[in-house]
Image: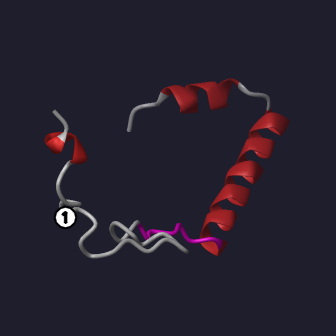
Amino acid sequence: MTDTPALKKFSQLSEPDQHAVEQFIDFLLNKQKKQPVKTTGRKGYGSWKGIQISDDFNAPLGSNPMDNWA
């Protein structure tokens, strides 16, 4: 396994700083276990809370009034 830039930087830290970084990483991992990432996405048009779009929202609205204007 080769050293990545992060590992090289970590090895340059003093012993107390390395310990602090390890504790912080442990904290982040524990936090991640407690709060799973939400994977629910948008389900489609009109699915936002409080917004309802009719099934024919993309249908033509009728004749254009400008067609009859000469």
**Element type at mark 1:** loop
Q: What secondary structure do most residues of the magenta stretch adopt?
A: loop
Image check: 37 left or right of 44? right
Task: Name the residue carrying label 1.
Answer: 59
Q: Which residues are magenta?
A: 35-41
**Location of the N terminus (image quadrant):** top left
Q: Is residue 11 magenta?
A: no
**Location of the C terminus (image quadrant):** top left
Q: Position of residue 2 (x, y in %)?
A: 40, 32
Q: Residue furthest front?
A: 70
Query: In which quadrant of the rendered view does residue 52 lie?
Result: bottom left
Q: Residue at x 68, y 66 (%)?
A: 30
Q: Residue furthest right?
A: 16
Number of other residues with Cα within 10 Å of mark 1, as a class: few under 14, some 14 to 19, many 20 or more? few
Q: Amino acid at mark 1?
A: Ala
Q: Is residue 37 magenta?
A: yes
Q: Is residue 4 above or below residue 39?
A: above
Q: Is residue 41 above or below residue 5?
A: below
